[in-house]
Image (cartoon, rainbow, N blue to C red):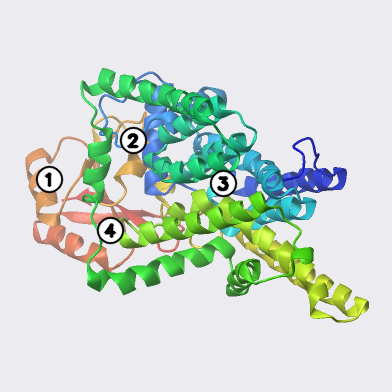
Amino acid sequence: MPPLAAKLPFQAKIWIITLTWFAFWVRVRGLFANHFHADEALFAGWARLIAVWRDPFLLSQAVDKPPVLFYLQALFYPLFGAVEWAARMPNLIASLLLVPLVGLLAWQWYRDGSTAVLATALITCLPLAVQFSATAFIDPLLTFWLILCLFLVGKKRPGLSGLLFGVALVTKYQAVLFLLLVVGLGWLFGWKKRAWLRWFGGAALPMLFLFFWEFMRTGELALWQNQIGNFGGLRLIWSWELWPRFIGWAQQSRFVFGSRVMAGLFLLSQITLWLPRPQAAQKTTAVARHITALLSLFLLAYICLHWLLAIPIWDRYFLPITPLIAIIFAHGVVTMLQSIPLLGQQFRTQVGIKRGLLGLFAILLIFSAWQGRNGRYPIGGQEDADNGAWQIAAFLADEPYGTVLYDHWYSWQWHYHLFDKGVYVSWFPHASALVEDLAVFWGKGRRYIVLPDTTAALPILRELKHAGYAPQPIFHSDTNPGIILYRIGS
C-alpha cells in the first residue's frame, strides 16, 4: 500500500466538498416535504416523551429498540418545537456527514482520487441513500456510525473505532452483522492483540450504558426479546419461501441503484474486477485487492443472510451496505476505465469510450438524485406516508377533552400528532368491538372514527349503521389514497 502520509489530491477534495453541498440540496427537500411512516411516528413519539420529560426512560412504552436515536431526536424538540422535521434532524446531519466520509474511506482503501470522487458521487445520488436521509428511521444513523467505525479501523484508532461500533450496536442491533467485516479489515491493516483489546474495550462502554438503561427501566434485559417477539422469532426460511423471498429482495435491491441500467453497470463493474489482467496493468496494491475480496464476500453474505432468515423484506435493510456498494461500485467503474487501453483501439477511440461511459454514468446519477429528491421511488421518506393522518390531526387539534377518536390503522401517527391534545385515541380490533365500546360509553363526549377511503371501510360502516349509529363524513385528506374522518351520530 502507498505510504499512509499520501494525501488526497486537491482536485478530489474540491469535488468531494462540491458533492457534499449538492447532497444537501438533494436531501433538504425531504426534511420538510415528507410525513411520518408509522415507525417514524412511533420513534418520534418516544422522543417527545423524553424531550418534555414526561417519560424520560420510556417506562410507559413497549420499547423494542435501543434508545440512541430517540435521545438525539429529543435534543431537537426544545430547539425547533413540535414539528415533524425536528425528529429528522439527527439523520439528516448524519447522512450529510456520510457523504464526504464515504469518499475518505474509498481513498483510504484504494488510494485513488477518481475512486474517492466517484464513490462520493454515488452515495450522494443513489436513491436509497437520498430518500432515507431526512427520515426518522433508525437506519441512517446506524449507517453513519458503522462507516465511521470502518474508517477508524484504517486510521489505526482501535479504541475509538470500538466505541463507534458499540454506539452503532446501541442504535440498532443489526450492527453486529458488521463485526466480521471489522475483524477482516483489522487483520488486513495489521492489528495486534493490544489493538483488539482496545477495540473490544471501546465497544463494551456503550453496551454497558444500554444494559444499565434497560435494567433501570424494567429490572431486566428485555429489549432483545421484545424485538425478536415482534418479528415472530428468528428462523431459517422454508424451501417454498426461497423463490418468493429471492424475488422480493431483488425487487427491493433495484432501489439501491434507481434503474436497471445502473444495476447492470454495477454487475459489469464487479465482473471487471475479477477478470484476469496483466500485472503491469494492475493499479491497486495487494491490500486493496484483499479489501475488494473482503467487501465482495461480506456483501454476498449480508444479502444471503437476509434472504435465508425469515425477516421482513424491507428496503431499509439495504441502507447500511449502500456506502460499501458505492465504494466497490466506484472501484469497479475506475477499473473498467483503466482497462479500456487494453482493448487496443486508437487513443481517440479510447478517450471517446471513456467520455461516453462517464457521460452515461453522470446522466444516470443526476436522474436518480432528482427522482429521489422528489420522493419518486416507493422507499424511505414519502409525502403521503401517513395517507394524510397529519391533516386529520390538525382538524381535531382544538377538540375538547373527552373527545374520542376510534382508529384501527394509524395509532402511532395519532400518538405523535395528538401528543398534547384533548383527543383520546381508542384502538379497535374489529367492528364488533367498536360497536360494543360505543354501547358502553355513548353520550360521554364527541365520538369520531377515521377510516381509509377504500373498500376496507365498508364492513365497519355497515356494522355501525346496523347498530343504529350514523357516521357522517366531515373531513377527507387530500392524499391518494386518502382517509376520511367521520363523526358518529345517532
Residue 98 lies, in percent from the top left, at 62, 42
Residue carrying label 2: 399
Secondary structure under tag 4 reads: loop
Residue 438: mark in rendering: 1
Q: Earlier in the sequence, mark 3 or mark 1?
A: 3
Residue 338 lies, in percent from the top left, at 78, 66
Residue 208 lies, in percent from the top left, at 36, 21
Distance from the alpha carbon under mark 3 to that under mark 1: 43 Å
Residue carrying label 3: 133
Locate residue 287 relative to residue 487 in the image: left or right.
right
Q: Earlier in the sequence, mark 1 or mark 2?
A: 2
Q: Quadrant of residue 104?
A: top right
Asked if one can make out residue 113 in the rendered structure from this viewpoint, the answer is yes
Using the image, determine if residue 455 lies above or below residue 448.
Answer: below
Distance from the alpha carbon under mark 1 to that under mark 2: 19 Å
Name the front one of labels 3 and 2. Answer: 3
Locate residue 234 relative to residue 188 in the image: left or right.
left
Amino acid tagged 3: Ser
Q: Earlier in the sequence, mark 4 or mark 3?
A: 3
Name the front one of labels 1 and 4. Answer: 4
Q: Earlier in the sequence, mark 1 or mark 4?
A: 4
Amino acid tagged 4: Ala
Q: Badge 3: few (under 14), some or many (20 or more) residues near its Cα, within 10 Å?
A: many
Q: Nearer the viewer, residue 391 or 268?
A: 268
Secondary structure under tag 3 reads: helix
Amino acid tagged 1: Leu
Distance from the alpha carbon under mark 3 to that under mark 2: 35 Å
Secondary structure under tag 1 reads: helix
Secondary structure under tag 2 reads: loop
